[in-house]
Image (cartoon, grey):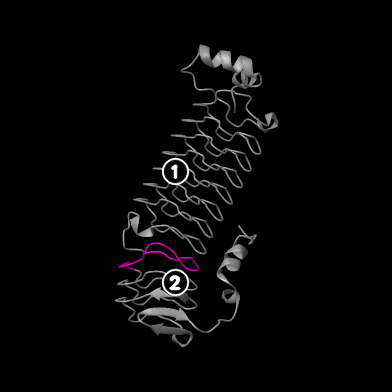
Amino acid sequence: MANSEHLQFFSDPQQWEAWRLRFPDLVPDLSASDVSSFDHLDGRKVQRVNWSEADLSYMDLRDANFDKGSFTHAFLNSAQLCNASFVFADMHHVDLSFGRCRRVNMSHTNLQEAWLVKAKMEYAQLRVADMRKACLRRADLRFADLQKAILAGARACEVVLVGANVAEADFTDVDLKGADIRRVNILETQSGNDLTRIHLSQTNLNELDLRGACMRDMDLRHVYFQRTDLRGADLRGANLTGAIFDQTMIAGALLDGAILDWDTITRSDDLLTLHTRLDGWWQVQPSQRWRDIQKWDNV
């Protein structure tokens, strides 16, 4: 529970400021408190505060500096966090679902098992963030900086990663089913050319450079390969049922034992192109299909 004296100081911005200046090394304890009724911080300094299990949902926290704070099991769902900073914060199991986090800085932050469903995190700074087993379903991380971040075991179905920097990031056992990872150099992750530990079924791999990638025995059903470079890739034994090919480069690719709908594919000059419309959801145009993905309601 929150320290009642600390909470009383927080209720008055002027008292809070004076108190924090007087005791700069003290870590305020606002754990398990409900401060969401304040709506915003009114300029309060909130670095190094214990917010564990506190409720800050729906608050306007734009531009706030929460560096080195503790947010374990805290509620920040639907909060406005654009340009806020959480560097070196402990956000283990925090609820950030539906948060507006454009350009948020969470570098070196502990986000293990964080709940980030539908969070808007465009251009977020997530360098060296620990996001193991986080739930990122339908989160928008386009152009985010995930360099050296740890996402092992993360559930990232339908996540948008367009243009994200994933250099040296750990994507081991990340579930990217239905994700949009266009303009992402997925071969720059810690796994390098070995993509076998990443789940990619139904993923949009348009225009990616996957030359020499090892995708052996992978589940690649309904993956979209528009102008994707698969030259020299190892696809032996991969399940490519329902995959969409459009000017896909496959010179030198290993396809022994791969499951493809060859009756629907034209191979010419080492390019694969779909020539027969498939039954079901994958008939629709790519742009419409990915719009439809974002409309799914099940979390």
Q: Amino acid at mark 1?
A: Leu
| Residue on which disc 2 sits | 220
- The residue tagged with tag 1: helix, strand or loop? loop
Q: Is residue 235 above or below residue 23?
A: below
User: Which corner quadrant holds the C terminus?
Assistant: bottom right
Q: Position of residue 128 (x, y in %)?
A: 39, 43
Residue 283: numbered disc: none
Q: Is residue 207 magenta?
A: yes
Q: Is residue 122 left or right of residue 166?
A: right
Q: Quadrant of residue 82?
A: top right
Q: Residue furthest right?
A: 37
Q: Residue drawn at (56%, 32%), measured in percent from left and top?
A: 63
Residue 27: % across, % down: 50, 22
- Stretch of the chain drawn in magenta: 197-214
Mark linked to residue 126:
1
Q: Residues within 10 Å of mark 2 (few under 14, many from 20)?
A: many
